[in-house]
Amino acid sequence: MAEVTVFHHAQGLTPGVRAFADELRARGHRVHTPDLYEGRTFETLDEGVEYMTKVGSGELLERGVRSVNDSPAEQVYIGFSLGVLPAQKLAQTRPGALGAVFVHACVPASFFGSWPERLPVRVHAMEADRLFTEEGDADAARDLVAEVPDAELHLYPGDRHLFADSSLSSYDAAATALFLDRTLTFLHGLDTAPNTAAARDA
């Protein structure tokens, strides 16, 4: 069993993000889903981005960081698109992180300092998602894979951005099933590796 925090994308803590968290819970993991939008969800990505801009990415990032203040240090951080920002910051800067999963997005590790030694990471996106390929995320992901020994970039056929949210029209069931299987395998590997945190911090 792994402790996991899942950060939602720009459309909010949608039923699809909650459903993903429930899938992890059904496999025995303890999953937290902070609501950075304080109960708001949006029908379109543009509406969500407009709200994100109004609140400010810096404020949303800090909401994400504050959301784990009372949760265990040893955990896995998963972020969907916008949610990659707090997930990546916490994975890189909060002591005790066991692993990270970034979906639809990735920022350069240098944005938050340096990548922790031996911290595993997985990045998932569609190969023709323009928000991933043309905004620098794909380059950041490839650089991370080149730098980190236990890092993998998984690209799926298609051009949809939020493909892993079952409540949105961009949902791709086949890609999501494979993404979920890979994520569960990743969590299981962390869960069964003896003294993972101690080995990383030694």
Image: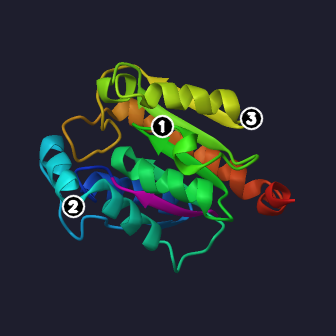
Q: What residue is shown with label 1?
A: 179
| Cα–Cα span, label 3 and label 1 | 21 Å
Q: Residues within 10 Å of mark 1 (few under 14, many from 20)?
A: many
Across and down, in percent, residue 190 comes to 70, 53
Q: Where's the N terminus, which quadrant?
A: bottom right
Across and down, in percent, residue 41 comes to 18, 58
- Report the magenta stretch's main SS: strand
Residue visible at 51% across and 31% down? Answer: 140
Tell me the tag on residue 149.
Answer: 3
Q: What residue is shown with label 2?
A: 55
Q: Label 2: state its secondary structure.
A: helix
- Colour style of the rendered protein structure: rainbow
Across and down, in percent, residue 135 comes to 35, 28
Q: Amino acid at mark 3?
A: Pro
Q: Is residue 33 at all visible to an observer of this figure?
A: no
Residue visible at 28% across and 59% down? Answer: 13
- In the image, is 144 to the left or to the right of 139? right
Query: Residue 31 colored magenta?
Result: no
191 to 163, vertically: above or below: below
Tell me the tag on residue 167.
Answer: none
Q: Residues within 10 Å of mark 3 (few under 14, many from 20)?
A: few
Q: Which residue is at the front of the view, 161 or 165?
A: 161
Instruction: Read off the magenta span.
Output: 1-8
